[in-house]
Image: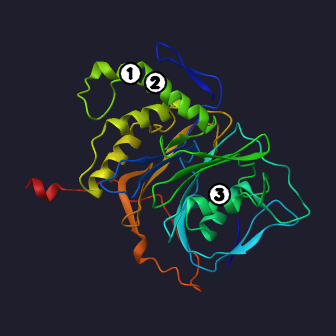
Amino acid sequence: MKKTLLAIGLAAATTFATVSSANACLVYVGKSNDSMPVIGRTVEFGYDVQTLASFPTDFATFPRGSEFTTYGSDTPLTWNSKYGFSGMSHDGLVSDGINEKGLYVAMLWFADGKYPAQDTSKPGLASGSIVNWLLSNFASVDEAVSGLAKINVYQSDDNHLGIELPAHFQLVDKSGKVLVVEYIDGEMTVTDNSDLGVMTNSPKIADHKQAYQQFLKQKPHLDASSEVDGGMLEGLPGGYTALERTVRTAILRDLTPTPKTKEEAINQVVHALNTTDYVRGAAEFPSRGMSGGKQETSFITVIDMANMDYYYRTVDSLTLHKVDLNQVDYSKGKPVTGFNIYGGIRFVDVTDRAQ
């Protein structure tokens, strides 16, 4: 089956001032009970204000040998997947996924970037196909960035969304190494983000790291080894902008104790993601969205790499759903499969326990 596929400054009083893109998906590596990462990710996007329909998304599985063709080129890159992978798919374009070898890739909006010019003399790869290509072909973050450096990557609006997809990417593998790939001034840049582990949308990852370090300078005693009262958290950014969410998530992650079990680790990640939720319609960014720019947290995902479990919840169902990837058949020749993630269990009725 062929698939076509802000800079914000932190002042001395720890007050943020927005000077760039404010809308913000988020991805971060939480604490774990072992060396295997637990990854959380949110997707913020517009929704249809008339029908309340969210950003169309399927949980999709692509077996080994799946055929792909990128978009927006007379000489598109085509390939067959070496590895099977699963993730959140938007008409074939995956924004968040993991392959059978444990390579995880997340794509986040990056309006501050600038991609290379398209070289039509050879096959190229559109930005929206990068996640598919990496998960198809590579087993580790180092392999992935090495391979991507050899490919002509470009932007095009010739996709089902009808818009260019400016993006930067966070890659994580089972070793715990975290790399960020960005295209800035037409050049591919790679940043080791294993120390921070958190990334949102624009600005570039260097600004995320700077905002975090600036906050720590104001609050040098914030760590999980000491008792922290509410006063010590005064000034913790609570807004919806990208760097506010980066700092908030990183600090809350730092303060949580090391979990004793994988279940505790997953629970901590979900709690941290809860603090970044866009309540439907509360935020509005005219530059993005399906209708009028009103935003929501459409869904979150949590990846347990040790057990290869993929969790998600949606704006209309806050109950966690789980896919055990060990039970997914990635055999060559199997069809690409997918299902709509929305419309799940809204609540658990426990009335019988009250009798």
Q: Is residue 242 above or below residue 95?
A: above
Residue visible at 63% across and 27% down? 7
Residue 125 in view here: yes
Query: At which x and y percent is residue 319?
Result: 34, 54
Marks 2 & 1, CB-CB < 8 Å contact:
yes
Q: Is residue 328 above or below residue 41?
A: below
Residue 241 in view here: no
> Would residue 252 be found to the left or right of residue 196 on screen?
left
Residue of label 1: 219
Marks 1 & 3, CB-CB < 8 Å contact:
no
Q: How far is disc 2 from disc 1 in space, using C-alphas?
A: 6 Å
Name which of mark 2 and mark 3 comes first in the sequence. Answer: 3
Query: At which x and y percent is residue 331?
Result: 53, 84
Residue of label 3: 145
Q: Is residue 29 above or below residue 132?
A: above
Please name the amino acid that badge 1 sits on: Lys
> Is disc 3 surrounded by few (<14), some (14 to 19) or many (20+) residues within 10 Å?
some
Label 1 residue SS: loop
Label 2 residue SS: helix
Label 3 residue SS: helix
Marks 2 & 3, CB-CB < 8 Å contact:
no
Colour theme: rainbow
User: How many dots with numbers?
Assistant: 3
Residue of label 2: 215
Quadrant containing the C terminus is: bottom left
Most extreme residue toward the right, as rendered?
121
Query: At which x and y percent is residue 277?
Result: 44, 39
Q: Toward which corner of the image does residue 219 lie, by quadrant?
A: top left
